[in-house]
Amino acid sequence: MTNLVEIRDLRVEATTDSGRRVEILKGITLDVAAGETVAFIGESGSGKTTAAMTLLGYARPGCRMSGGSVRVDGRDMVALSEKERATLRGTTVAYVPQSAAAAFNPAATIMDQVIEVTQIHKLMPPEEARHRAVALFRALSLPNPDSIGDRYPHQVSGGQLQRLAAAMALIGDPKVVIFDEPTTALDVTTQVEVLRAFKDVTAKRRIACVYVSHDLAVVAQIADRIMVLRHGEVQEIGNVDDILHRPTHPYTKELLHAFHPDGGGRVVPTTTSHTEPLLDISMLSAGYGPPQPNGKPLVLAVKGVSLQVKPGTNLGIIGESGCGKSTLARAIAGILPACDGTIQFNGRDLWQSARQRSREQLRDLQIVFQHADTALNPAKSIEDILGRPLTFYHGLRGKARDARIDALLDMVRLPRALRHRRPAELSGGQKQRVNFARALAAEPKLILCDEITSALDTVVAAAIIDLLKELQRELGLSYVFISHDLSVIEAICDEIVVMYRGQTVETIIPAERQEPQHPYSRLLFSSVPKLDPTWLDTLNLDADRMRLA
Amino acid sequence: MKTPSPTGTLAAWSGYRINLVGLVSFSVVLFWALMALLAPYITPHSVGAMIDMDYFGPMRPGLWLGSDYLGRDMLSRVIFGARYTVGISLAAVSIACFTGVVLGMTSAVLGGTVDMVVSRLLDAMNSIPSKLFGLMVVAAVGSSIPVLILTMSVIYIPGSYRFSRALAVNIDTMDFIMVARIRGERLPYLIGSEILPNIIGPVLADLGLRFVFIVLLLSGLSFLGLGVQPPFADWGALVRENIGGLPFAAPAVIVPSLAIASLTISINLLIDNLPQKIRDRSAP
């Protein structure tokens, strides 16, 4: 038998609370050979995680595997009892979760959690397990492999934790490993390291991998074959080269297209250098913690940043997590009062704290948060969410307010019938549109977009970006666009500011095709995965990394 | 594929999934609420009228629940007792929860000094044992219905405050509160429109629970003779005044005890089995 995993006509269904049955997977067939990596790709809700989970014999609460078979190493996970499945989990098939931070118990050391699998299955004495773990840490190129296991999860970085989660999965010597979007939550610069470590380790041990992701470029680096899923059905399956260069299915083409957001469709405003800037920040500093004797907060996240935004133009701020880009947005919006520097908006000084700003100033400067899930009140209808700024800023009520809500929903391309729904009843992309529509309701001059596409999958994110461009054309807005995703920023911004450790290190104007100069910007720009499957293997980032250190 | 069940049609009609236990306990609560409301119209005899020749009389036609230690009709007294027990407890729990929840949300939203002062003040109040506090107040100013209501609401404000503050603090960290703040919203809108709808479920459950505590505390005070004063009597007082009937297995002492038990247990069960909204709208 050559195939380690054989899935035949797999069906998974769920029963909703009104007793209706929903098919989540509608007959999937797939083989994975030893040492092969197959990627499951598709938008959220396509059933890719559900499909991957069936290899563990697991269906989420309320779901069940209703037909077909999943043979892993010759044993049918669908037919096995829960007890038999448990003996296979961790030893034959293992799982690396999306959020390693949530997968580790904060109250136990990393080593204890990594070797837990060997203790549950009584594979080896703890001493031997620790030696194996250290060897794995080394193989995954973790720093201080001998001592990192003694730390607690919060004492290591996100990228390291993700590799430690992989070590946890690999310690039981599984034949199949499932990676569930393991790099989605990481920065591009970290992602490269993690991907490399995964690729090395799994190739050496000839492990069959199932890699779940919505990022085609990441998948191109790591997978041998790609399965494109949508609505629980296989749209297309083939080797990486075929999918990337000769896609046959329209959905695959759409995915590929979304990966190249075009900079076109936006009229670059004809601003001269004499135009008064809309937003002018000079030497702004902000941070967290109690004030120190010198008047500065304990941790300074933004250190003396100056930048300008001209009316009708867009500024992109890019940098890794922790570089202070979100803090900068919060300081501009007045959520976190800056401790030093000035903010001028529309030619007038703004108070550092939003509490002291006038209603007019608050209205002109809106901020849109990353997570639409928490930015929209789950207890209110879309109508109430959009209606409040209309009433609050413009005093609209009754019919006028209703008409304006309809206009806003049209503007963000949402059906009007959605107004009576609650946020939980919308998809991720729809929620982000509502989130944006609420900012539009205020009729602002400038919108701060804080990572608004990061939580969305590629196709949906591309649609949001197109929407932003269109609205800018119609309404003459300006955006300050904060992201760690370079392709998004390049698609919409006239000017890109690279932030590193709380300071701006470089300003890049994409239209002039200018090459990044600063070593950090070079590292950042070259870390963005390309669709070329050989990109990761040929990439050499060490020069820039060395120069930064 | 639908399986017909007794609550199935009700669920389809209302859009809520209703549990059988919830339905039964709701009926019991509703029954006592109706008794309390309609007491003057349905009592067969006057509360104070001595109509039985014997005391601690057994259940029999005309005196369906027997008679008490003075030969008064027990059925009428239990029905009127519902008025006091349910009415006083409801008033007290409403005041306690309203004050507690408003203070709790305010503290969570304002934070800082306000939070600190209010929290410590109410913590201090929380440290006084509730029964002792009740006894002390009633002993000092005498027992009347307004005094009972106020005392019991004061006793239960700190708990309600702690509970709602804990919930509101979690909501307060959400981005939509931040959005409302930088929109320039004021405190009443923040607590009433943004936070309250998100905590109303647990708050109502807590209200039910606190109602039960108050019923028990009121019954306890009445049992000690410090609650509702004769000739009127709530259920606790009914148990006390008829305690002498215990050796005779008189219904007069069992019935009010059962009334207290049925109301408190039903409310607890009702809270645990509240109807759940069916979110799958595309169902046929």
Image (spheres, coloured by chain):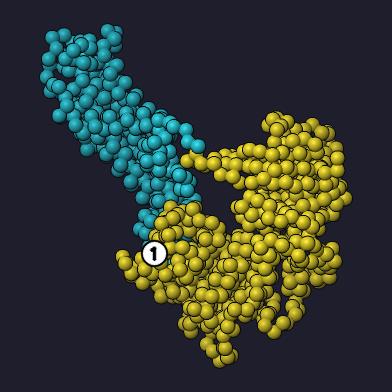
Chain colours: A yellow, B cyan
Which residue is at a point 60% across and 42% down the rendered structure image?
Answer: A13
Where does residue B14 sit, x and y in percent of width and height? 37, 42
Where does residue A231 sit, x and y in percent of width and height? 61, 52
Given residues B279 and A105, the one toward you in this image is B279
Where does residue A215 sit, x and y in percent of width and height? 69, 60
The reply to whether residue A460 is in sight is yes
Which residue is at a point 40% across and 33% down the rendered structure image?
Answer: B7
Provide the chain ID for the residue under circle 1: A
Given residues A282 and A79, the one toward you in this image is A79
Question: Is disc 1 surrounded by few (<14), some (14 to 19) or many (20+) residues within 10 Å?
Answer: many
Position of B193 relative to A106 (above/below): below
- Name the residue type under label 1: Gly
Left or right? Give the position of A184 relative to A536. Answer: left
Position of B10 relative to A137 (above/below): above
Which residue is at a point 11% across and 19% down the rendered structure image?
Answer: B49
Position of A50 relative to B60 (above/below): below
Q: Quadrant of the N terminus of chain A?
A: top right
Q: Which residue lies furthest to the right in this view?
A: A204
Residue underneath mark 1:
A387
Given residues B23 and B234, the one toward you in this image is B23
